[in-house]
Image: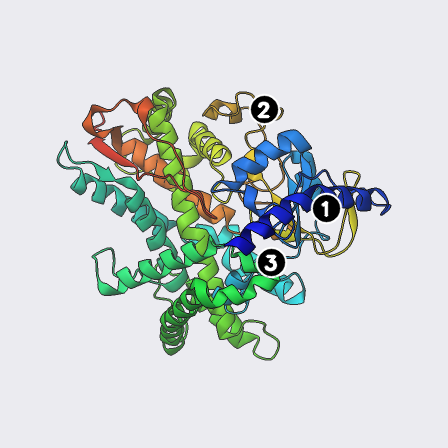
Amino acid sequence: MVSLSYFLIALLCTLPFLLFLNKWRRSYSGKTPPPSPPKLPVIGNLHQLGLYPHRYLQSLSRRYGPLMQLHFGSVPVLVASSPEAAREIMKNQDIVFSNRPKMSIANRLFFNNRDVAFTQYGEYWRQIRSICVLQLLSNKRVQSFRRVREEETSIMVEKIMQLGSSSSTPVNLSELLLSLTNDVVCRVTLGKKYGGGNGSEEVDKLKEMLTEIQNLMGISPVWEFIPWLNWTRRFDGVDQRVDRIVKAFDGFLESVIQEHKERDGDKDGDGDGALDFVDILLQFQRENKNRSPVEDDTVKALILDMFVAGTDTTATALEWAVAELIKNPRAMKRLQNEVREVAGSKAEIEEEDLEKMPYLKASIKESLRLHVPVVLLVPRESTRDTNVLGYDIASGTRVLINAWAIARDPSVWENPEEFLPERFLDSSIDYKGLHFELLPFGAGRRGCPGATFAVAIDELALAKLVHKFDFGLPNGARMEELDMSETSGMTVHKKSPLLLLPIPHHAAP
C-alpha cells in the first residue's frame, strides 16, 4: 500500500514535466498533429471515456474541434465529429483509411477475420466484399426475399394481437422486434427459422449465443491498448468466454453447412424459391473451386456478419423509431393517417405500398439520425502517413467517426435534439453513404453493404405496426413521459424495454 502511494505521488509530481515534454516534442517535430486533450502516462485518455464514449467525445470536440487526436494507451486515435472531417476520411481519402485495426476479440469471433466487416483491407477483403454486394445483398437479391419480410411482419402483428388481448397487459415490443429480425435473418441466411419462436431448446441456444457474441463485441480490453498488461488476460475471463462461444457457434454453423451440402442447393428455401445465403455461398464455392476465397470458415464468418449486423442493430433502430413516435404523438398521428390512407380497405400493408409513404420513410431517417445504432461506427485505421484538414496523421492511427455527434450537430441540423421527420420531406439527404451529415451505415469502401436489407425490414414493420395499432403506456403514463435513456456498448439500445399497450385499430368499412 505504501509503495503504491509513493508511485502515485511520483506520477503526480512528474506529470507537468511529461506534458511539457510532449508539447515541446510536438513543436520541434516539424509535424502539425490535431488538437489533443491532456493525457496521462501509460493509459493516455482511456480513463476519460466513461460509459458513453460518444457523448464524452462530443463534449471534447466542442472544445478541441471536429478533428482531434487522443491516445488509448499506446494507440493513437483520430476522432472525427463533423461532416467535413468524415467526408475527408471516408470519401476523399477513403483508400488511405480503409483498413481495420487488429481487434483480438473480433478476430477470433469471426473465424480469424474471414468476414467482410472486420477483416483487414486487401485482396481477400475486395473479393469477399464483391461477393456480398453482388451475390448476397444486391437490390435484386433483397427484393427476392420480400415474401419472407411480409410473412414475418404479419406473424409479429398476430403475436401482438394475442399477447395484447387483455387491455391491461403490456406487450414487450423490444423482444418481439428482436424476434422479428432474428427470424427474417434466419430464413434469409439459413433457409429456415430455428425453433419458430416456440421456446424450443434450439432457438434458446441460438439466442444465447448471439447475445453473448454481442456482449463480447462491446468489450474493449485494456490489454489491447497497453501491451505490457497482456498478462491480465489470464485473469479477466475474456479469452475463456471467446473460446466457449466460438466453439459453440462453430458447431452450430458446421451442422448448418453440412445440411445444406447434403441437399446440394435444392431450391426449397423461404425466399420465393430463391436460394438462401448459405446455398449461394456454397454454390459459389463449388463453381470457383480452384480460385474461390470462399472456404467453409468464410461461410461461417459471413453468416455471423449477417446476424451481428442484421438482427440486433436492425431491431434496435426499429425500437427507437417506435419509441420516438410514442413520445411524439403529433408525429405518430401524422404517420398513422398516411399509412391508413394508403392502405385503404386492404387488410395488409405490402411492400409496394411503402413508396407512397414519404412520412414513413422520413420517420425512419429521423430515427436513424437521432439514434445511430453503432454510434462510433466500426473503427478504421490509416495505412500511411497523410494530412487531413491541415493536420498530419501518422500511419497506423486508429480512426473513430462519431456519427452520433455529427447527427446532432446544431451547425448542421436545426433543433438537432428534436424528433422532426418533416426535416427530410423536402431534403435529398439519405442514409446511403453519399451525405456525410447522416451516417448510420457508414460510407465509402467500408460502409455497411446491408443498409438496403435492414431498412426494408424496418419500413415494412413500422408501417404494419402503426396501421394495425394505436399504442398506450402502462399505468396510465403520459406518452411524453416515456423513458428514452440508453445503454452503453457497441450497439446503443434503449435502456428499458419498450412496454406498450397495443389497441387494435379497426378501419371504418
Q: Find disc 2 in the rendering and name its residue.
A: 410
Q: Find disc 1 in the rendering and name its residue.
A: 18
Q: Position of residue 63 (x, y in %)?
A: 65, 30
Colouring convention used in this rendered image of the protein: rainbow
Q: Nearer the viewer, mark 1 or mark 3?
A: 1
Q: CA distance from mark 1 to mark 3?
A: 18 Å
Q: Find disc 3 in the rendering and name its residue.
A: 226
Sequence-wise, the earlier of marks 2 and 3 is 3
Local secondary structure at mark 1: helix
Please tell me which residue is depicted at 60% across the width and 58% down the height of the picture.
Answer: 226
In depth, the one of 81 and 146 nearer the eye is: 81
Please tell me which residue is depicted at 67% across the width and 66% down the height of the picture.
Answer: 123
Q: Position of residue 495 (x, y in %)?
A: 36, 39
Q: Residue furthest front?
A: 2
Q: Nearer the viewer, mark 1 or mark 2?
A: 1
Compared to residue 84, the image places residue 195 above or below, namely: below
In depth, the one of 435 and 287 nearer the eye is: 435
Give the residue type that dot 3 points to: Ile
